[in-house]
Image (spheres, helix red, strand yellow):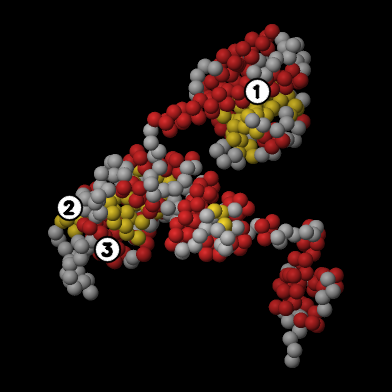
Amino acid sequence: MTALPVDTAPDELRLLFEISQALDAGPDLRVVLEPAIASLVSDGGFAWATLSLPDTVRVTLGIEVAAGLTEDERRRGVFRKGEGLTGEVWRSGEPILVPRIADDTRFLNKTGVGRRHRDARFVGVPIRLDGEVIGVLGGGREPSERRMDDDHRLLSIVASMVGQAVRLRQDLIEERRAELAETRPSLRPENLIGNSKAMGRVYELVAQVAKSDATVLLRGESGVGKELVAHALHAASPRASRAFIRVNCAALSPTLLESELFGHERGAFTGALNRRIGRFELAHGGTIVLDESGDFSAAPQVALLRVLQEREFERVGGNETVKIDVRIIAATNRDLEVAMREAAFREDLYYRLNVFPIHVPPLRERKTDIPQLADYFIERYSHQKHRSVRRISTPAIDMLMKYHWPGKVRELENCIERAVLLATDEVIRGHHLPPTLQTADASGTTFRGTLAEALAATERELLVDALKNAQGNMAAAARQLGVTERIMGLRCKTYGLDWRAFRSPR
């Protein structure tokens, strides 16, 4: 606990005691923070007080709890790092004391509280945990004889108490997680790799829905592993011993898709020489995965809607109603909500498919899984390619962790397969990875000059390219670069470029 200054007034001691009691009142952090912040206004004399916390990706800082503000004003208080007084405290980690908010250009008045309290002063202090700024505590007070340094001291003590309350609850959460880990088996399916929080959420959802027959909608970008999640759902279901059928709906035309899904009778269309059993019939008793289901055209959407509602259909060109018992898993990388607004996807079909949605995160959102995935692919391709590769070097791991992976897990797999073939001493090193992953440090191509030298080299290269394209015609080269012919001549003179050298020989 932060030691109190010896000159702390009795009223402040009572206020701090009230806040400490509020922070110890229960496990829910928001529930205990609200009365603590309210005490700063009701008993501490502040006109308003706010506690701001970052979002999950730490891009913006929003007012989590406030006193003296309306709910609408609280919601408007969102700041980026360095934006406004609150954003500046978050960025710098240093307190800010403003004698009059109306005189300070950094006060943006996003909440609107400044219209009621133009002459108020403001104090903002960082909330720290393990040396990291995890939030900002701020308070505004109308002009009074009380010193701003006293407000600074008071808010600093409260911020320290809030930081400790956050730590205690984090420790409690970790203890509960450890207890759960000891008392229950891992939720991770055998065919999925990764222990990140993002994938942990996927594992939890798979475990919750796998035993039921509910329709599942797997959402996520192409290449994130939706098919693997579908396999995990089937393997953990009572249908695990029955058929698992996958259909790529985007690879077939509407006519062929209907035939593929529901089958057709002999003579249903040109080339239909025999009756064909569709994928839904083949999946009877098991699971069918409709991959790229967001690409259904109008006619198959109607037929699929009936299957979802009634579990029955007719083959193309037939009259016999076929009843089926099948678990349906749909997967898509499309934004179905946008497709509905554009009338490209039926609203009733969307709600039939979206019974239990699971978002599969891309690799850039689960980077802590990269080393584990890399080890898996090394072992797999070492065996498959008959290579002896035992590990990946630390610099190479750093390169994998810094890359943004637009090609998702498939791209990582391809990178490791290539590196396994190139490795010569049982270790994958940085230079074995594709050029797209190479950093300046790893490849030894760090630019050693100044910014001015780099800009000059780029400008000269642009001038040379323009003169080459224009075959030495200065006017044409100037037009290409969007400058006047006079400027073109001056820049060429600066870099010692002679337009005659670029003319094509006759």
Residue at 49% across / 56% down in the picture?
Answer: 378
Residue at mark 2 = 323
- Counting from the top left corner in percent of width and height, residue 402 is at 60, 51
Please name which of the two marks, 3 or 1, marks the residue nearer to the observer: 1
| Residue 398 sits above or below residue 172 on the image | below
Determine whether label 3 and label 2 are within 8 Å by CB: no
Circle 2: element type: strand
Is disc 1 surrounded by few (<14), some (14 to 19) or many (20+) residues within 10 Å?
some
Which mark is first along the chain, 2 or 3?
Answer: 3
Furthest toward the top, the residue is 10
Q: Nearer the viewer, residue 350 or 118?
A: 350
Q: Amino acid at mark 3?
A: Glu
For residue 43, side relative to residue 378 (left or right): right
* Residue 401 seen in render: yes
Please name which of the two marks, 2 or 1, marks the residue nearer to the observer: 1
- Report the quarter where the C terminus lies: bottom right
Residue at mark 3 = 260
- Counting from the top left corner in percent of width and height, residue 199 is at 45, 43
Which mark is first along the chain, 1 or 2?
Answer: 1
Residue at mark 1 = 160
Residue at 21% across / 50% down in the picture?
Answer: 285
- Counting from the top left corner in percent of width and height, residue 205 is at 38, 40
Circle 3: element type: helix
Q: Amino acid at mark 2?
A: Lys
